[in-house]
Image (cartoon, rainbow, N blue to C red):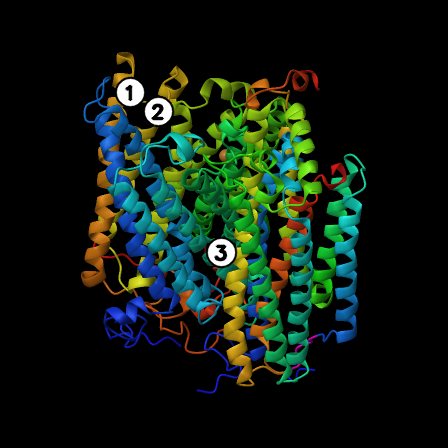
Amino acid sequence: MHRTGELYGQYKTLEQQKETATLGMWVFLVTEILFFGGMFLTYAINRHEYPTAFGVGGNMLDLNLGFANTVVLIASSFTMAMSVWSAQTSNKKLVPIFLIFTLILGIVFLGVKVVEYKQKFDHHLIPGHGFDITYCSKQPAAVCGISEEDHAKEITEIKEGIEADGGLVALNAHAQLYFSLYFGMTGLHALHMIVGAGLLVWLILESRKGRFDANYNTPVENIGLYWHFVDIVWIFLFPLLYLINRHLA
Amino acid sequence: MSENGHQEHVVSPKLYATILAALLFGTWLTVQAAKIDLGRWNIVLALLIATIKMSLVILFFMHGKYSSRRTQLVIVSGFFWLAIMLGLTMTDYSTRKPEPSRSANPPAIAIHRA
Amino acid sequence: MSGTTTSSGGEYQLPREHYLNASYGIRSWLLTTDHKRIALLYLAAVTFFFFVGGIFATLIRIHLLTPNGLLVTPETYNKLFTMHGVAMVFFFLIPSIPAILGNFLIPIMIGAKDLAFPKINLLSWYVYIIGGCFVLYSFGTGGLDTGWTFYTPLSSVYSNSAVTPAVIGIFINGFSSILTGLNFVVTVHTMRAPGMTWFRLPLFVWSHYATSLIMILGTPVIAITVLLAGLERIFHFGFFNPAYGGDPILFQHLFWFYSHPAVYIMILPAMGVVSEIIPTFVRKPIFGYSFVAASSIGIAVIGFLVWAHHMFVTGEATYAAIAFSFLSYLVAIPSAVKVFNWTATLYKGSISYDTPMLYALGFIGLFTIGGLTGLFLACLGLDIHLHDTYFVIAHFHYIMVGGAVMGYVGGLHFWWPKITGRLYPEFLARAAAIILFIGFNLTFFPQFILGGLGMPRRYHNYPPEFQVLNVMSTAGASILALGYLLPMLYLTWSMRYGKIAGPNPWPATGLEWKTDSPPLTENFRETPEVDWEPYDFVHRPDLGLTGSKPKLPGKLSPAHGDD
Ligand SMILES: [Cu+2]
């Protein structure tokens, strides 16, 4: 079957078909804004209430990995935009190449995320019964795999945090709110990345058939919109989760 | 350009690269800004930088600048409703009396805070 | 222009081809992308959940016949009202009119062949079914006792009932609603026939457009909210859990950000139905078309600004409560615009009291009572007394059952000839409408009095002095049940044995009445062009409506089934 932008039955023109698909995608992204919005609201209220615990929790994330991941994701947005450009200018061979770059960067991002999650798991920072915000500060630095300098910082920070937050029990409880939000928000974001990666795989396979050109590129454009949206979510998650209290350290 | 008469704006790779550079600069900037103690302005600055980065992505990567009025309205209304949700909920939290029972182990100072 | 043939006696026959006989077999239904068939799939599923919710309601009313409770333990009673609420709100009221009548009619009303995204339309039905299965699984394995509101930390920490599958089901079901709303909005924007301008759209379409905005903007928030509660329950995360210092009231903010506007997801489509029925049986254009259209959008927008009126007796800040109380009053304005305009449409019209009209008139009265008692509850001081009493129960049942369900059943009657090509028995239908109206009022009016006297909701027992009113309510519920069973029986009967309706039995002026009954799979033989204004009963020679006579001659009066 020839599938280069054939006209589906319910539409009158190809133009109407494209317009409809694009509008549908944007409306879908609006629902995504509000979907993530509920989490951002939960974050805002809890952080407003417990700035100290959120600061302590935020400083336990690996800033270098977070920063690197932000760069990776922004770069993937650029390659995604370039694949749309390639399609629009009928550079049929470039389309899959840029898409593959995008996919690789997306996978790198997810890989780094796995490393970070593993680290949090080892440091007893998964909310629930085993959660212990002081775990690393009680161990020798080597156990948690952090430098002596960072370790010393963490010890002071936790000590100050306990004081400011009204005791160890309080700090430990409130830090669980922070890590619940950390895992909830980044987890939901990662889930969107996985869906996006799946869409990219399909898109790469299709684009290798030379389906997308100046006349027909709606799938590239719409999956691109989705990918950029997921990037935007991360643009907010990075400062909100990683950079709360970096000046303290 | 497309043949079907649909006005589709093609953004040049040069502009895309400029946006990329701006986004990377913004990322660097937000990390540097976080390392300076600005008190409550840290969060304001971080959100400001993030909002600018987001605007760049929407306007250029997502072609928001070249979209139809209708699409632009859809985008704006999404953020408008988000603002309603955040803003009206904040009216509650910002005007509440401090509640000692809220925290698991309330510090004595917090009760006198407001 | 229509394929319906008229035999010599003036009797109609069914068109030779239509969407129901276009193909046969179970696959042709389960894999269909025809919006009309998907509407019927929804009709079946939604009716099933109406039964489920109805059974719980029956058990509740039987239990409350005596002060100490007749039937079940207190724990089971908690489950009964919870499962009644969950089944009715999420699986009956919200999808009922949009997913059935809206799905069937919107493309036809705007002159399109289908919705913008037919496959997504089918997907939304499957999503609904999957969500429904999770919820039924929860009902069947221990039930659910949190109240339909799922307040934390009861739902996320303490409840011993099957909350997890229910939460997953509600989460999944949310996407069905989102996809339907998305489809409608895009369809109305891009699929209108030539000449179908925004201000020629039927008011049914306007109200569904407003409903879809709420589905798009609100439903994602309930999805994330129940997801967060689910994460608290499953993984012991903390978002709202006071044990971690979280704020349970934040859950309520998020929950009501959707669930207050969700009331308008239920009532706005019913308002659209009423706006179609009234001009048809008054034979006059609707009074103030643009105001009725704009008030739908007004209700949708203002409806998003009032949610915290559900939380006046929690730890919510007093200043915020004052603001939300004021904003809640504002919703009365667009709602009143509608009621006044419907009433003004009746003025000097030539009214015929056909079944759909009886439902529409019932709607106006019951919605007015429900709406006005809503103002009592929006009043900050009064709400302290009335909160969580039967007054609230009576209020929202007047809106949801008296309003939304009346609109739904009325709409089902009004478009039944279009959907099936056949008329229902008019006398039985009128009788059912009147039985429903009486049964409804007898069930719920006593609850206003009970609430005013202070009887709290969600209790399995009550002081003996409340028994008379409770018995009245239960008696009313039995009449109400009869009022629902009758239409189910005769509508089913009429699918096979009803009189053939013809393309436009009432007659009405919308585009849907210009095609066959039942319509073709493509809805129209050729794309229609619209060159008339909405609800014009005088300048429509294409429908045989001409001249300025308010009363129409015999042939054009409403067709009736087997009286
Ligand atoms: Cu409300």
What residue appears at the point 78 percent right and 71 percent down from the top-left corner?
B15
Chain letter of disc 1 in the image: C
The label number, if any, that marks residue C250 in the structure image: none
Relative horizontal placement of residue C299, taking residue C549 as reference (left or right): right
Quick check: A91 above or below A133? below
Does dot 2 land on a helix, a strand or a loop?
helix
Q: Amino acid at mark 1?
A: Leu
> Are dots 2 and 3 in contact, CB under 8 Å?
no
Give, as a single range, the part of the protein colored magenta: B4-8
The label number, if any, that marks residue C447 in the structure image: 2
Q: Amino acid at mark 3?
A: Gly
The label number, if any, that marks residue C469 in the structure image: 1
Quick check: A132 above or below C507? above
> Are dots 1 and 2 in contact, CB under 8 Å?
yes
Residue C299 image point, x, y percent: 55, 43
Residue B2 image point, x, y percent: 66, 82
What residue appears at the point 44 percent right and 32 percent down from the top-left corner?
C151
What residue appears at the point 44 percent right and 50 percent down from the top-left corner?
C174
Distance from label 3 to label 1 (Cα)?
Answer: 41 Å
Q: Which residue is mark 3?
A: C181
What residue appears at the point 25 percent right and 56 percent down from the top-left corner?
C424
Distance from label 2 to label 3 (Cα)?
Answer: 34 Å
Chain letter of disc 3 in the image: C
Image quadrant where residue A214 sits = bottom right
Q: Amino acid at mark 2?
A: Gln
Chain letter of disc 2 in the image: C
In depth, the one of C514 and A65 nearer the eye is A65
Q: Nearer the viewer, mark 2 or mark 3?
A: 3
